[in-house]
Image: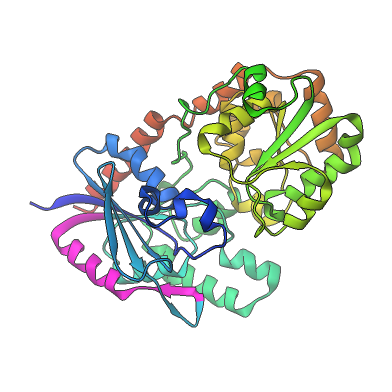
Amino acid sequence: MKQNKIIFFDAPQFKSSRDAVTIEHQPDSDYFYMVGFSGLYANTIKGSLPGYEIEVWHIDDRVDQLKTRNVNGIRGKIYPMKIFLSRNFAYNFSLIKDLKKEAKENNLVFIFSGIHSFFFLILSVFFRTTPIVGIQLGGANSYFKYKINKSVISLIYSVIESKIYLKNLTHARLYTNAEKDYLGKVLGKKQISDFPVLPIDFDLMHPIDKKIAREYLKLPENEKIIYQTGRAFRNKGTDVTISVWLKYLKDKGIKLILTGIHESDELFDLVKNSGVDYNGVVPRADLPYWYSAADIYIYPPFDEETLNFGGVGYAPLEALACGTPLICTTMINFPDFEKNKNRINGICIIPTNEEDIANGVLRFLNSPPKKEKCRALVTDYFTKEKIGENFANTILNIQKMHT
């Protein structure tokens, strides 16, 4: 009897100058084998699918030979990367060969962490009869890119994608209307769902008394603090955050703190020269202290691609789990947004311009929402148990259709 097996795939991984300061990017680390979101998804659902073997595969230009490791009962496999013409066309045919063998010996389900990748298209072509679940992670589809940059290559790829690749998807988890509209032209309504797939670690991400958090981080007890973490990029809204602080908030004695900043970041010079307090990558175990020490978490990207394809973003959700209110443009992509609009408006301001951000900061500083309301919104959707059960049901229904 064949074994049921789920194989997660991330998009190809590339070297980065940031690798040296990020433990997940160290080849000797267990995290390296549970790359990106795939490892988190795999660990989320494994308890809900006890009869399934679960593995995480990807190709990576940081290894020169096949590497495997079992981590928490999940096998990770990393294949060296080959490139045709450009890094957009990364591949490894040894991986395809090994998957062919797996397909003969097991009942497979593929899960793509991300959708719009040439690597995923290749897999879908070679495995037309294998059920495939695609998960939106951010990044625009090719037709959207074509509308922005008028690139013929983007247009050609969007045609190939819609005519060949997307038709091979069995199911898709999508979080934004733009992506639902795009894939909805190829997939049926029953093939698309929007329940989250990535849980929040509520044991780690929990409210900490503000005084205790600031003592731990050696921050002033009585200052008003707004906070943002992550790389300094325009699509993260770092430039907007700094601009608002300089124009409207700095003179009012409000402190802006950024963490996760690295010299390779797109806006590193802006951060460095702005006068804000900034730090590099901080230990994940310290993040709840940073979230709890802040009066408000800010995530204000206005660029069209992020708003249409980026989802909410993980850091804003973690901040809510720690009881911290948000100024956040991407909360328009929260699950069941219309249903939850009143709850969201009580703990989050969704700005349309820089003045909205500044006014929102002053409003929440004067009248902060209750921590319990912030946390309750995310616990309704992002617990490991709820996500694992929902995702497991999706997998079980898919396999019933294919057996």
* Residue name at image x 59 percent, y 39 percent: 315
User: Which residue range is magenta in the image?
Assistant: 87-108
Residue 38 is situated, as x and y percent measured from the top left of the image, at: 40, 50
Front-most of residues 110 and 87: 87
Asked which quadrant contains residue 287, the reply is top right
Residue 146 magenta: no
Q: In this image, 205 relative to 31: left or right?
A: right
Residue 319 is situated, as x and y percent measured from the top left of the image, at: 61, 31
* Residue name at image x 40 percent, y 32 percent: 384
Is residue 287 shown above or below 162? above
* Residue name at image x 64 percent, y 29 percent: 217
Q: In this image, 93 relative to 53: left or right?
A: right
Q: In this image, 52 relative to 124: left or right?
A: left
- Residue at the bottom extreme? 85
Residue 2 is situated, as x and y percent measured from the top left of the image, at: 12, 53
Residue 254 is situated, as x and y percent measured from the top left of the image, at: 83, 31
Asked which quadrant contains residue 373, the reply is top right
Front-most of residues 4 and 282: 282
* Residue name at image x 52 percent, y 56 percent: 20
